[in-house]
Amino acid sequence: MKNSKQHLTDAFSHLQDAQINLKHALDNSEKLNNKERIQSTLSLVNEAVFAAANTVANYQDSHSREK
């Protein structure tokens, strides 16, 4: 059974995968309106990747001392 940190790192990995796939979709999209929608989604996913990376970096294990 996974713990909280493992679920967090899994989510972070999935966000990174989504980011890569959206970049590929953007590169391969031909219609301007599709490019704009994909770019908008990619921007939101980029923010989520940044937030998740920050959470992973600052995650405190249960045995860590609280500050």
Image: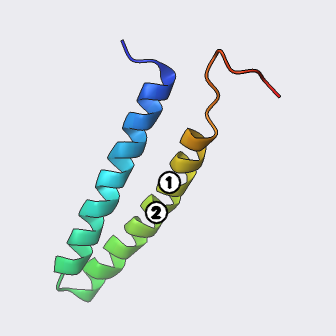
Amino acid, disc 1: Ala
Q: Residues within 10 Å of mark 2 (few under 14, many from 20)?
A: some
Coloring basis for residues: rainbow
Amino acid, disc 2: Asn
| Residue 13 in which image quadrant | top left
Q: Residues within 10 Å of mark 1 (few under 14, many from 20)?
A: some
What residue is drawn where x is 52% and y is 60%?
47
Name the side, left or right, on which 58 lies relative to 32.
right
* Front one among 63 and 38: 63
What residue is drawn where x is 61% and y is 22%?
61
Q: Is residue 59 above or below residue 51?
A: above
Provide residue 38's location: percent of width, then percent of height. Answer: 32, 71
Name the side, left or right, on which 65 lies relative to 27.
right
Image quarter of the N terminus: top left
Q: Secondary structure at mark 1?
A: helix
Q: CA distance from mark 2 to mark 1?
A: 5 Å
What residue is drawn where x is 46% and y is 18%?
3
Provide residue 57's location: percent of width, then percent of height. Answer: 58, 43
What residue is drawn where x is 53% and y is 56%?
50
Q: Is residue 8 above or below residue 62?
A: below
Image quarter of the C terminus: top right
- Residue carrying label 2: 46
Kindly give the residue lying farthest to the front in the view shown: 64
Name the side, left or right, on which 44 lies relative to 24.
right
Q: Is residue 7 above or below residue 36?
A: above
Q: Is residue 42 above or below residue 28?
A: above
Provide residue 23's location: percent of width, then percent of height. Answer: 28, 70
What mark, if any, has residue 33 been given in the picture? none
Q: Secondary structure at mark 2?
A: helix
Contact flag, marks 2 and 1 (Cβ < 8 Å) = yes
- Residue carrying label 1: 48
